[in-house]
């Protein structure tokens, strides 16, 4: 019977569908699962048949009252639409209650960006810490250089294997969102940092584990995880930028902004970042507006 379908069981089946059929990232699957768990907790609905449009509206209104960000509420709306659309197509429910569900408009928040001078200071400091040959310091310097040089997501960095590096062309192959593969370039500073890590540090780290083809390793010799990368970047980036909360994505934002500041065209930056939509990349043009204003004041006779 349709009315006997358990919401928790349906959520787990939906999560498997997202991972196996849609091939969404583990982070997206976790977020959608958490959103649907929140729906069950807030509404007290244990069965799919108990959830209608008004129930969903009350759920989103509760999230608004408790101060959830608009981006979070928009994602929860998207999660509900995807879930109930799937449930309808799968024959678990007869009518999709999200057909008239409106998502709140998302406010555009400009990304946190470190200045080019700050990034130079951060990378120089990381290189100096690695000068004595400490394996962890060498690894950290190489991770920072590659994150910034290739504008990688932290999940992409963690997924890089040794075979993904092409040191002749100075490129790295990564698996991005939606399991889309792309090749990103990096420069000679990153190449030197990688060489130092691969020759002087990685053998010592891999000896602590059971052997892996992962490029970057944790202290126990296994593939490094996102949490460890976050900790490294916050520790090294925070003092120079004045924000202890700044994370790996700030390096990606900074790289994209600095590319545009340096004259790269928007399509090139889109391809390098692996954005499916040019509109996603365009947010960096707002960050670069300060440079445009400065150039105008210097060059225009009536500025």
Image (spheres, rainbow, N blue to C red):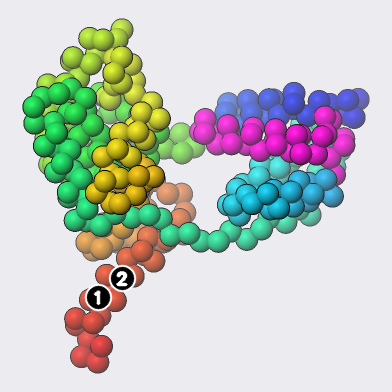
The residue labelled by disc 1 is 294
The residue labelled by disc 2 is 290
Q: CA distance from mark 1 to mark 2?
A: 6 Å
Say whether marks 1 and 2 touch (CB < 8 Å). Answer: yes
**Depicted 279 relative to depicted 89: above or below:** below
Q: Which mark is residue 80?
A: none
**Depicted 76 relative to depicted 164: above or below:** below
Q: Position of residue 89 (x, y in %)?
A: 76, 36
Which quadrant is home to the N terminus?
A: top right
Name the image quarter holding residue 146: top left
Quick one: SS at disc 1?
helix
Mark 2, residues whose alpha carbon is within 10 Å: few (<14), some, or many (≥20)? few
Q: Position of residue 24 (x, y in %)?
A: 54, 34
Question: 142 left or right of 192?
Answer: right
* Residue for point 30% across, 45% down: 238
What secondary structure prevails in the magenta region? helix
**Does residue 272 appear anywhere in the picture?**
no
Which quadrant is home to the C terminus?
A: bottom left
Quick one: SS at disc 2?
helix
Q: Nearer the viewer, residue 234 or 5?
A: 234
Outermost residue, left direction? 132
Mark 1, residues whose alpha carbon is within 10 Å: few (<14), some, or many (≥20)? few
Outermost residue, bottom direction? 302
* Residue for point 88% across, 25% down: 4
Magenta residues, as a range?
A: 24-52
Question: 199 left or right of 156?
Answer: left
């Amino acid at each position: 019977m349709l009315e006997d379908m358990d919401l928790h069981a349906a959520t787990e089946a939906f999560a498997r569908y997202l991972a196996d059929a849609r091939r969404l990232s583990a982070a997206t699957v976790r977020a959608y699962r958490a959103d649907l768990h929140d729906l069950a907790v807030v509404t007290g609905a244990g069965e799919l048949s108990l959830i209608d449009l008004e129930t969903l509206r009350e759920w989103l209104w509760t999230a608004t009252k408790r101060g959830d960000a608009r981006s979070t509420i928009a994602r929860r709306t998207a999660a509900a639409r995807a879930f109930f659309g799937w449930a309808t197509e799968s024959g678990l429910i007869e009518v999709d209650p999200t057909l008239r569900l409106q998502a709140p408009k998302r406010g555009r928040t400009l990304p946190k960006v470190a200045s080019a001078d700050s990034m130079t200071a951060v990378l120089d400091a990381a290189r100096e810490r690695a000068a004595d040959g400490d394996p962890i310091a060498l690894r950290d310097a190489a991770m920072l250089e590659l994150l910034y040089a290739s504008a990688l997501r932290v999940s992409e960095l963690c997924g890089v294997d040794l075979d993904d590096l092409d040191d002749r062309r100075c490129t790295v192959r990564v698996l991005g969102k939606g399991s889309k593969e792309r090749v990103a370039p990096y420069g000679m500073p990153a190449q030197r940092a990688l060489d130092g890590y691969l020759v002087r540090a990685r053998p010592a780290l891999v000896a602590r584990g059971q052997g892996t083809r992962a490029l970057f390793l944790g202290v126990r010799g296994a593939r490094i995880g996102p949490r460890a990368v976050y900790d490294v970047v916050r520790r090294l980036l925070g003092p120079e930028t004045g924000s202890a909360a700044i994370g790996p994505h700030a390096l990606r934002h900074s790289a994209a902004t600095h590319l545009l500041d340096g004259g790269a065209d928007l399509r090139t930056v889109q391809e390098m970042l692996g954005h499916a939509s040019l509109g996603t990349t365009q947010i960096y043009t707002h960050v670069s507006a300060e440079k445009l204003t400065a150039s105008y004041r210097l060059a225009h006779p009536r500025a």
